[in-house]
Amino acid sequence: TYVPPNPNQVGYVNTNVYIEAATPNNGADTITFPASLSGLQGGELIIVTLQWKGNPPKFTPDLTSAAGPYKWQIGSSAVPLVIADIQVFTAMNPVGAKEFTLQVKLNSVSPWSISLSAYNTVDASAPTYSPQTVQVSAMTKVQTPVIGLSPGDALYAVGIATDANGTFPGSAGNPPGNNLTPGTGFTADNTGVTNPLVEHLITSNTGSSQSLPAVVVNPTNPTANVFVLGMGIQSTPVSS
């Protein structure tokens, strides 16, 4: 159900998450994958987070890079094993469009994921800011450095977990899949898929500025590797 935007406060609209197998021929083949997000009214900010391992992706329509690419690695005595590349992109949904459709062309030697989230009442000239990341293993609570949020802004976050050897989404844990849960104050955005976990926190538009970390909880696999990215979303400026 569409919720009208609250003036000068970021509004959350919808999220869709896809998890896909490695591309054929051990990740050598390139595929074009369709992704979409519905339940929109037009004019929303779309945030796209891609996790893969291969050549840089190409999008139709073109997207703007918001954060990354990041190399998610396992540290060891040998050369670090790269689990995945992770990058965040943004786009503005055309006015009046009820659905945002996207094609990503890529190859990936490992299973990969893409998430699309929509927010309204966003400053289109400077929609996102201050991306922060953290990657750790064997920790139940994982959090990024703090992000300074102005009143009415939102904190977008995504958490991704692998088995200790880097397998995504992995089979350890009970239930299997390295399921993640949102941190205190955050709302989980994707239903039925908890790895990747997409979440958000919206600050009051009548309060004061806050400095908060993106927080993800890893309750099922104590040896999992977890990557968390947090990023501020700027609300529509207050009219003078």
Image: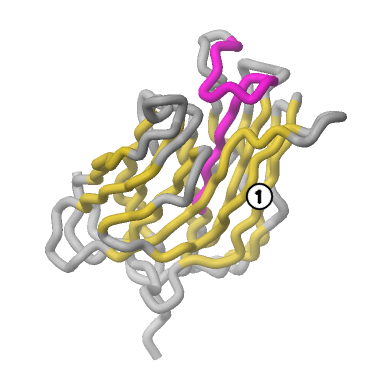
Residue 111: image x %, image y %? 46, 27
Judged from this view, the residue extending furthest toward the right is: 77
Q: Nearer the viewer, residue 62 or 200?
A: 62
Q: Nearer the viewer, residue 41 or 37?
A: 37
Q: Which residues are magenta?
A: 156-173
Residue at image mark 1:
133
- The residue sitting at 39% across, 61% down in the picture is 90
| Quadrant hosting residue 121 | bottom left
Place of residue 63 in the rendered image (x, y in percent of width and height, measured from the top left):
36, 62
Q: Residue at x 65, y 55 (%)?
A: 132
Q: Position of residue 234 (x, y in %)?
A: 47, 68
Q: Is residue 122 left or right of residue 205?
A: left
In this picture, residue 224 sits left or right of residue 41: right
Residue 47 counted in the magenta span: no
Q: Look at 63% across and 20% down and name the residue there.
A: 163
The quarter of the picture where residue 232 lies is bottom right
Quarter of the image where one finds residue 14: top left
Q: Amino acid at mark 1?
A: Thr
**Is residue 209 left or right of 128 when viewed as pictured?**
right
> The N terminus lies in which quarter of the figure?
top left
Does the segment drawn in magenta span residue 172?
yes
Q: Main secondary structure of the magenta part?
A: loop
